[in-house]
Amino acid sequence: MKSTIILSTTNNNSLSKEIVESLVSKLNRNNVNYEIIDLYKDNFNPVMSQNQEKLYENGDTDCDLVKKYQDILKNTDEIILVFPLWFNNVPAILKGFFDKVLLKGFAFKEESNDTIGLLTNIKSGLVISTSESSDNYLKEMGNPIETVVVRGTLGVCGIENVEYINVNSENKSIHFEKYFK
């Protein structure tokens, strides 16, 4: 089994980084192969250039880093996203990753006015946001990450069995015990 962790934060003292360190320890203890895609460390540019937008229409890219990320995703069994929640959404760099990496023809195809996910090699996922927002607040907001990221992005790409958790000061100890120890 191979896990891929996608990290979207610049703050080395953040809860997101703490979670990734705990995940790495757990994966090492369980002898699981893993790769970390650290979008900021890789200097990933989430902005699509004019040429990339033209290529996007055909499911293509001129970005070597995007191609590298696609190769990693082709060879992973589990995807783990870790990011701070900003205005009830993912950071722009992660949104750019979705737009530039999860291309038509790579992550999904369109057939008879429907999408068919192509990343079915990824058997499970864990989406972890960190925030000061309570779970009740996120439910009142319609759980935007569950809707947009889990179902609307990963689901469209054929990635099923995805769990979403939001880690905050209220529930940190419970989630750390359940997921990261």
Image (spheres, grey):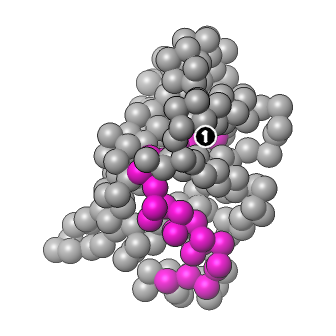
In this view of the protein, which residue sits in the foreground, 127 or 54?
Answer: 127
Query: Is there any visible trace of residue 180 in the rendered image?
Result: yes
Q: Which residue corresponds to the image point at 71% horizontal and 64% vertical from the top-left?
A: 44
Question: What quarter of the picture does the C terminus occupy?
Answer: top right
Which residue is labeled 1 in the image? 82
In the image, residue 73 lies in the stretch drawn in magenta: yes
Instruction: Return the x and y of residue 147 as percentages of the image width and height.
Output: 39, 42
Left or right for 106, reference 24 = left
Does residue 105 appear to the left or right of 115 in the view shown? right
Q: Amino acid at mark 1?
A: Val
Could you tell me which residue is drawn at 44 percent across and 65 percent down?
74
Magenta residue check for 67 = yes
- Camera-side residue: 175 or 30? 30
Q: Position of residue 103 (x, y in %)?
A: 45, 72
Q: Is residue 100 above or below residue 85?
A: below
State the extent of the magenta-drawn residues as a range: 60-83
Query: Residue 42: percent from the left, percent from the top?
Result: 75, 61
Task: Mark yes or no: residue 92 visible.
Answer: no
Q: Is residue 156 above or below residue 59?
A: above
